Image (cartoon, rainbow, N blue to C red):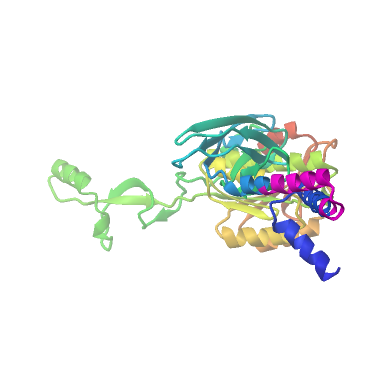
Amino acid sequence: MSPARQLLDLLRERSVVTRTGWGAAVVGVLATGLGWALAWEEARIIGLGLLVLLLLSVLMALGGSRVDLDLSVHPVRVRPGGVADGSLLVTNGRSRRVSPADLEVPVGEHVEAFRMSSLGPGVRVDYPFPIHTTRRGVVVVGPVTTVIGDPFGLARRALNASRTVELFVHPETVALPSLDAGLVRDLEGRPTADPSVSDLDFHTLRQYVPGDDRRHIHWQSSARVSAAAGSTMLMMKGYTDTRRSHLGVLLDARPDEYADDDAFETAVTAAASVAVRALRDDMDVTVVAGAHAVDRVGVARTLDGFARVEPDDTDLPALAARLTGLAPGTSIAVVVTGPDTSVPEVQRASNHLGPHVRVLVVRVAPGERSTTSSVAGLTFLTMGALSDLSRLVRVVGGR
């Protein structure tokens, strides 16, 4: 490419003049030159008129319409098929009137366009727009582009002048029985039979034995017992150890592991359903789904993470290694993958988790018979239909 052509491209890129404007400029220069060379009055008038019009158009585009833009979306979390209300609030905070402009709001893959009329000082205008959703994901709204130009399309200037807002389209979830039904047996607050001298769960009282730590004396009970017995008797607090379950959810996001996109979305729904059920059972939950991970947050933010899930080539051992790094105290792991994932690969993932972690593998196999089986100490759940997930969890929990 010649230097002259590169310079012309640079001018076009950085200039406010449109292609139509450049065409008008060329015609204006040629007409003016021919008019002077041939003493052709009409050509001179046409040429000079085009050049003056182009100059006025550039001045209009450079004049600017500096306004305050406030972009909002409500609610910021919906289900597939839901509708959110978008709003663009435009405020003229300047002391003089601003010129008209076009406002363009990117909403996912399409653009909402509005024509802003001239606004006086302090005037506020709200431009509402609906956001329709069809599938799970994150819809990015904004930034707003303010397009300033002339009515003839000879000059145009675009300014990005707002923040972006994310609309989370959460995956659908299915109702599952409480994981306390047997799938997990060490929930917080459930005392074990193991005594403990640490101050974890005050469970019972016992009589003082020489050598006991006097910091654990229950003075009120000691006073009552001593008064009834007529002699000094000290009562000690008895503790039992409690454990809090930590569930790890591994979602295999490799697209080749699933029959089609619908099967992949079914896997996302299954993983999200298990995570939500565990959170509602007051368990700690860490999710590693492809390239995304969420660690010990609430239901809403966990589903935000599932909304971000996209196909990813990370294998199960790598997902398990990341889970171990995020949550070394994981006590049970649920792996959601495709129907053809090999047992050796699952075993390698299990080795990263450690021998103390119970591993359950949910194989998403649309159309197949839903069954449960045990292979090499691992529990496999073959899920032929999403509606069978609740029954499979109940069956495994009853073991």
Q: Position of residue 68 (x, y in %)?
A: 51, 42
| In magenta segment, residue 195 | no
- Position above or below: 190 against 385: below
Q: Is the magenta stretch mostly helix, strand or loop?
A: helix
Q: Is residue 272 visible?
A: yes
State left or right for residue 57 relative to residue 297.
right
Question: Residue at (59%, 46%) from the top-left corner?
Answer: 164
Q: Which of 307 and 175 is in front in this view?
A: 307
Count the numbered circles shown: 0
| Quadrant of the image occupied by residue 325 | bottom right
Single out the residue that lies furthest toward the bottom.
3
Q: Nearer the viewer, residue 84 or 270?
A: 84
| In magenta segment, residue 42 | yes
Q: Where is residue 334 in the image (x, y as percent from the top left)?
A: 67, 48
Quadrant housing the N terminus: bottom right
What residue range appears in magenta? Answer: 34-55
Q: Where is residue 131 in the image (x, y as percent from the top left)?
A: 65, 32
Question: Residue at (38%, 49%) from the top-left corner?
Answer: 201
Q: Can residue 173 be seen in this view?
A: no
| Quadrant of the image occupied by residue 230 | top left
State left or right for residue 235 relative to residue 370.
left
Single out the residue that lies furthest toward the front.
39
Quadrant housing the C terminus: top right
Q: Position of residue 84 (x, y in %)?
A: 61, 31
Q: Nearer the viewer, residue 147 or 212?
A: 147
State left or right for residue 231 relative to residue 215.
left
